[in-house]
Image (cartoon, helix red, strand yellow):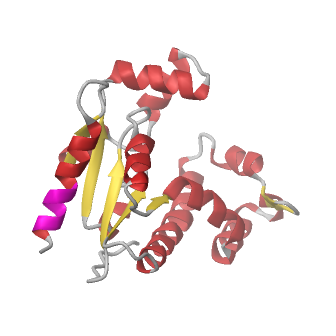
Amino acid sequence: MLSKMQTNKTIKIGITGGIGSGKSVISHILKTMGYPIYDSDSWAKKLMNENEEIRNSLIQRFGEATYTTTGLNRQFLAQQIFNNKENLTFVNSVVHPAVGKHFLQWAEQQYSKLVFIESAILFSSGFNKIVDKVIFVDAPQEIRLQRAITRDNSNAEAVMARIKNQAENDAFARTHSDFVIKNDNKTLITKQILSALNKINDREK
């Protein structure tokens, strides 16, 4: 289980939102402003290859075929969790705490007062418990749909299925976030980001 941790050194902020909402756009803007961004998805993939605790837990559960000489056998693992909620829950219970722990260690190594973690599953993973504030990136479904189709070279039916099956509940995440940034191709994003940052800094003074 992840537990709430506070430090005087850094203010940890989560960035979340549904498929095609534009979380990476917000992260990119913040990065150009000089803020450190922790991509939880990328780090999860990396840790599943390099973290011995994760490796041992997955092998113990699924067998030696879980890893090859080149690393995690993603196709094999995907087969184990496909339509198997118990196995999926187990994998999440191993990976999410490891990612959360790594993020906290990473955050303490940064020289910025504000650090960010981007995660599509911020609440369902429990990462919301280890951050101080949460930014939810919101966009109309039709825009999210088109973005995902273009980005993933997919089709509307496949993307809609992913949106409906996504682990995170958008309505819950939106109402439990501290800030909502509209990424609707109309509202200025940078202005909203600066407003959120100013409020965070003011509250921490």
Displayed quadrant of residue 191 = top left
Residue 177 place in picture, x, y as percent: 22, 51
Q: Farthest front residue? A: 33
Residue interval drawn in magenta: 197-202
Displayed quadrant of residue 18 = top left
Q: How many marks?
A: 0
Instruction: Tell me what residue is drawn at x 61 percent, y 22 percent.
Output: 153
Residue 38 place in picture, x, y as percent: 47, 61
Instruction: Tell me what residue is drawn at x 41 percent, y 49 percent.
Output: 27
Question: Quick one: 55 or 120, which is closer to the camera?
Answer: 120
Task: Name the quadrant of the N terminus.
Answer: bottom left
Q: Farthest right residue? A: 69
Residue 64 shown left or right of residue 137 in the figure:
right
Residue 64 shown left or right of residue 53 in the figure:
right
Classify 47 as above or below 110.
Answer: above
Question: Quick one: 107 or 76, which is closer to the camera?
Answer: 107
Q: Main secondary structure of the magenta part?
A: helix
Instruction: Tell me what residue is drawn at x 66 percent, y 71 percent.
Output: 57
Question: Quick one: 135 or 170, which is closer to the camera?
Answer: 135
Classify 202 as above or below 162.
Answer: below
Task: Name the quadrant of the C terminus.
Answer: bottom left
